Amino acid sequence: MIRTVGVVGAGVMGSDVALDLACYGYEVVLKDISEDVLHQAMEKIKTDFRLLRLVKPQAKQLTVEDVLSRITFTTAYDDFARVQFVIENVTEEWELKKAVFTELSEVCGLQTTYAVNTSCISITKVGSLMPRPENVIGMHFMNPVPMKELVEVIRGEHTSDETVACGEEFLKSFDKVPVVVNDFPGFVTNRVLMLTINECVWTVQDGVAEPKDVDKIFRLGFGHKMGPLATCDLIGLDTILNSLLVLQDSYKDPKFRPCPLLVKMVDAGYLGKKSGKGFFDYSK
Ligand code: NAD
């Protein structure tokens, strides 16, 4: 029975994963690298919870104090020895994830199950770092986590049937709908989504259309709730760039080469919603 969940990385995804779990009564240990980041995560959780209370039945019955009392904010791994399940959400960079999983293997119990929340990184490769690779599974959450039912669950080469079953049961306990797929870079969602977003950036760079019109075409023409460039801003331009680089490296296929405009925007610090500016302006 899972009661306490370790969440590593308190950025866009990790803070929302922690919030969602806390709304369903889980105890969460939320770890990041600095007090500053943890402070920002706490503020984000408070803001997101206020909005969530308006729409999500589980949140309506709670106060912000209830939610925060279920989350331990920490920069250390001390509390990870007692968690049964870990959800890792650090930056989409192999060397960072590798370092985190190596640290986790030293502090967590052998029975711990590990979920890798990644856009494109191989679950098999992460599993191979661990003493029990069969306990490692991919969980690609959708953003914003508390509002999205779908979780793309990735079975790595070593992932056991028990781990898949445990992962599915755990996700269902907080009203997620798991869809299990096999491990190939980008899985289904991001193999397709990253190409679409990147191609939309090319259309902006080539002067074919303004970002607002690119998105309008997808919303009105194809019935998408959100256009690809607004989606890019929501995910984070740095995460999109890192994902394209992982895909390009994995498939050795130039179709994944990042558009120079995307690279330039990341260099300029225009990371999307989290920085206040991306293809659209969020400063107000
Ligand atoms: P983010 O940049 O917002 O947050 C990453 C966090 O990881 C940062 O707060 C950073 O300080 C922290 N971190 C780095 N090294 C760490 C360490 N050693 N220990 C603890 N924390 C550490 O990124 P994000 O958007 O939250 O993405 C996290 C993961 O989720 C990525 O792998 C990404 O591909 C994946 N993902 C993102 C989205 C999205 O929409 N943003 C959607 C699905 C999956």
Image (spheres, helix red, strand yellow):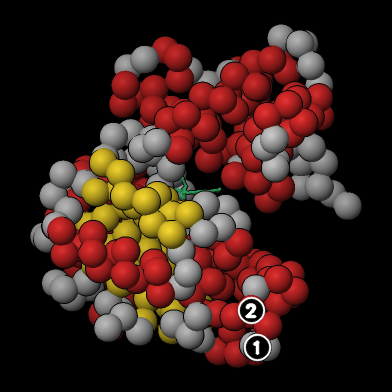
Disc 1 residue crowd, few under 14, some 14–19, many 20+, Cα 10 Å: few
Q: In this view, does 150 lie above or below 239?
A: below
Q: Which residue position is annotated with label 2?
A: 57
- Looking at the rendered structure, the kind of residue marked 2 is Pro
Q: Which of 10 and 62 is in front in this view?
A: 62
Q: Nearer the viewer, residue 33 or 133?
A: 133
Label 2: element kind: helix
- Quick check: can you spot residue 274? yes
Q: Which residue is drawn at 26% across and 55% down?
A: 137
x, y percent for residue 17: 50, 66
Q: Residue at x 39, y 67 (%)?
A: 171
Disc ID at residue 61: 1
Label 1: element kind: loop
Q: Which residue is drawn at 65% across and 22% down?
A: 200
CB of residue at label 2: within 8 Å of ligand 1? no
Q: Do the residues labelled 1 and 2 touch (CB within 8 Å)?
A: yes
- Quick check: can you spot residue 78? no
x, y percent for residue 175: 47, 69
Relative to 265, is 281 on the left or the right? Answer: right
- Looking at the rendered structure, the kind of residue marked 1 is Gln
Q: Quadrant of residue 75?
A: bottom left
The quadrant the N terminus occupies is bottom left
**Marks 1 and 2, how far apart in space?**
7 Å
